[in-house]
Image (tube, rainbow, N blue to C red):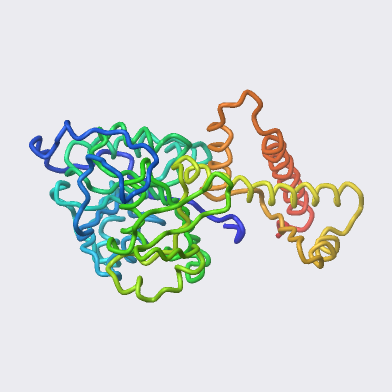
Amino acid sequence: MDTYNKTDSDSESHQPLNHIYDPTSRDESAKHRAEPVKLDNQDNSHEEPETFGKVLVVGLGQLGLPVAKYLTDRGFDTYGYDINNTAMERAERIASVRKATNLNEIDVFIICVSTHKPEDMFSPQVDGLLSIVKEISREAKNGALVSIESTIPRGTSKKIFEMLNHRLHVAHAPHRWYALEEKDHGINQLRVIGGVCDCCLKTAIQFYGYPADTVGEVIVNSKDGSCNSLVLHGSTSYSRNDITSISSLESTKSLGIPLHPVSNIEIAEISKIAENAHRYLQIAFAEDLYLYSQANGINFAELREALNSKWNVNILEPRDGIGGHCLPKDTKMFLQSSQSQNKSKILGAAIEVDRIYREYRQAKNIATKLRTGNPIS
């Protein structure tokens, strides 16, 4: 795995949960569409959970397992589900999770499943995630929180909200977890967060970072673009940088994660796939520069070192092509999520560059192995 190819590999939980269905737990009448108004004055029909005691992590793979362990360490009653029995047993051993027997008792559902095709990890697909949501819709109690940490296409969160008949809060807090640098880029790092409506966002913020009695309203993305902060009771406003250092907020039972709230959940959805598309571009440029150097007799390593001597330049080291679970898949997801007839030409070109670079490296590797018996590094 390339150290700069940050992975987005989630679990393979692509089948419905096998739990007891209690039809009395479903209240079809609790439906609403919230308008973007101040949270303190908001009138909505969601029931807000008094506590976030019981949390179910769906998908216990590379992302879900550390999430479950983090929850347990923070004192939550943590449950888990994974279609893979080995993953479930590992989570029971490492993260002390338990199997859920009644979804109606769960306060928070955290979805950490993979969003690629089973037969092609480079192609996006959310069918498995949606099948899980169907099961949650049948059994979950009103007012529970569904937080999607999996990478998803634009519009998925609202679709899930509709599938849940507007009974549950739906939020998206895309993960930024990186396996190779878990200490610095683990679960507890600055996260973008959005909600389908304001009450969803407020509930998610309380769970992820801030106690209920301090969150007065959330102000995000003002019309002039100058405001992105949390406003706490007492009329004290803190920026997202300042608020992470307030120790009093860390004492409450929550995840204690610094947050960057956004006004529209689609911004949260796009932020994740755009982050990875940007990374894809960075690597593709390094590959293109390598091909340029090879074609023109330039020492690429020396050229790269010279370029990186400038304070705002960071040319990456191209290796075997752009791999991992996340970058190719999420770049395709970004392209597919656009409604424009004119898809991103720069990303299309980057994908083509990576294809050419891979072919070049493969041919050079074969030639070197035939000549010396050892492949190139």
Name, please, the residue furthest toward the right: 297
Which quadrant, please, contains the C terminus? bottom right
Q: Position of residue 106 (x, y in %)?
A: 19, 52
Which quadrant is home to the N terminus? bottom right
Instruction: Return the x and y of residue 45 as percentages of the image width and height.
Output: 22, 39
Q: What residue do we see at 66% from left, 26% from top?
A: 342
Would residue 50 be found to the left or right of residue 319 on screen? left
Report the side of 64 relative to 323 (left or right).
left
Q: In which quarter of the view is residue 246 placed? A: bottom left
Question: Which of 88 and 259 lies nearest the eye of the viewer?
Answer: 259
Residue 282 position (above or below residue 72):
above
**Going by the image, does 283 lie left or right of 59?**
right
The answer to whether residue 133 is left or right of residue 241 is left
Seen as rendered, the residue at the extreme front is 235
The answer to whether 162 is drawn above or below residue 260 in the figure is above
Towards the viewer: 377 or 215:
215
Name the one closer to the observer, 276 or 265. Answer: 265
User: Of 98 and 263, which appears nearest the observer?
Assistant: 263
User: Which residue corresponds to the image point at 28% horizontal and 63% vertical from the top-left?
Assistant: 213
Instruction: Identify the image quadrant of residue 91.
Output: bottom left
Residue at screen point 34% across, 53% down:
204
Q: Position of residue 57 (x, y in %)?
A: 29, 53
Q: Is residue 283 above or below residue 97?
A: above
The image position of residue 226, as x and y in percent, is: 57, 53
